[in-house]
Image: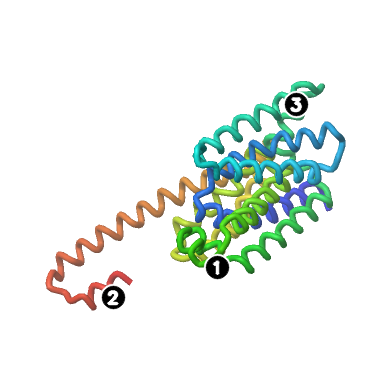
Amino acid sequence: MTAVGRAIVEAVLLGAVGGLISVRVLLRRLPFFTLAMTHATFPGVVLAAIAGVNLYLGSGVFGVLVVLGVLALSRRPEQGTTTAIGIVLSAGFALGVILLSARDGFAKDLTAYTVGQILTVGTGDLVAVSVVGVIVVVLVTTAGRRLTFRAFDPDGHAAAGYSPAGIDLALLLAVEAVIIVAVPAVGAILAVAVLVAPAAIARLWARDIPMMTAVAVATGAGCGLAGVLVSARYDVAAGGSITVVTGGLFAVSLAATAAWNAVGRRGGSRLARVAPGSTGGERRFRET
């Protein structure tokens, strides 16, 4: 398989996996938390490179520590969640930059670790994304109801006897795993686009969680493919291309759905003026 072929497979797989987990990230209102995790994972990636150990192993160990640390900070009564996240975000990225600045070839390494180099991915990277994808699918399939319960009714979830720490930890570890396998493709910093944007786009079009999930997976895979093709065609950074394509699709979706809703509201007003004495049954029929 050629380098471009591997890049396409990597982008599509990563986009699909990111789209799947992004729904849970959005439902739990964790986009800012995810942004902090991408920045905090950055020094782990750098340390793995400096130590000469496997990227996934080194950054994985560091990522677990990050997840546990942020969870502990956010549960301290004197520390708000936003405060803990802000500290981790800035300190994590700063630590990564300091570590990189102590090495030769700082600028080149910074680009590779922050925005990725998807054309250099190998078979091992494809296997890693596939394994993480299976883990995410298993989590969403087996714990989907609990994740939804926790997202929409945290008090009821706790009252039912469920441990919030366990399901929170499982979700955040899955998010961290996706961040780690996203590093070769889009870098540690741009990985947040893969983990947030697909669900944000899907929420504009979908009416329920299953439909939202399907749209998010398709959106993530499609944006990954489009980003690599744009990168190959115009010789620009693939990580940036994937992110820009995703952001552009979100902007278009936002404008399109706003226009559609505006037209629908005007149409409803006209119908109400034409038939002011219509019955409730007739109104419900028009609304559906």
Q: Are marks 1 and 2 in contact (CB under 8 Å)?
A: no
Residue 255: image location, x then y, percent: 40, 48
Looking at the image, which residue is at 54% across and 48% down?
197
Tag 1: amino acid: Arg
Tag 3: amino acid: Leu
Please identify the quadrant where the C terminus is shown. bottom left
Lower position in the chain sequence, tag 2 or tag 3: 3
Lower position in the chain sequence, tag 1 or tag 2: 1
How far apart are the two marked residues, 2 and 3, measured between alpha carbons?
Answer: 63 Å
How far apart are the two marked residues, 3 and 1, measured between alpha carbons?
Answer: 42 Å
How far apart are the two marked residues, 1 and 2, measured between alpha carbons?
Answer: 31 Å
* Residue at numbered disc 3: 99
Residue 132: image location, x then y, percent: 73, 56
* Residue at numbered disc 2: 285
Looking at the image, which residue is at 61% across and 35% down?
88
Looking at the image, which residue is at 50% across and 37% down?
78
Q: Residues within 10 Å of mark 1 (few under 14, many from 20)?
A: few
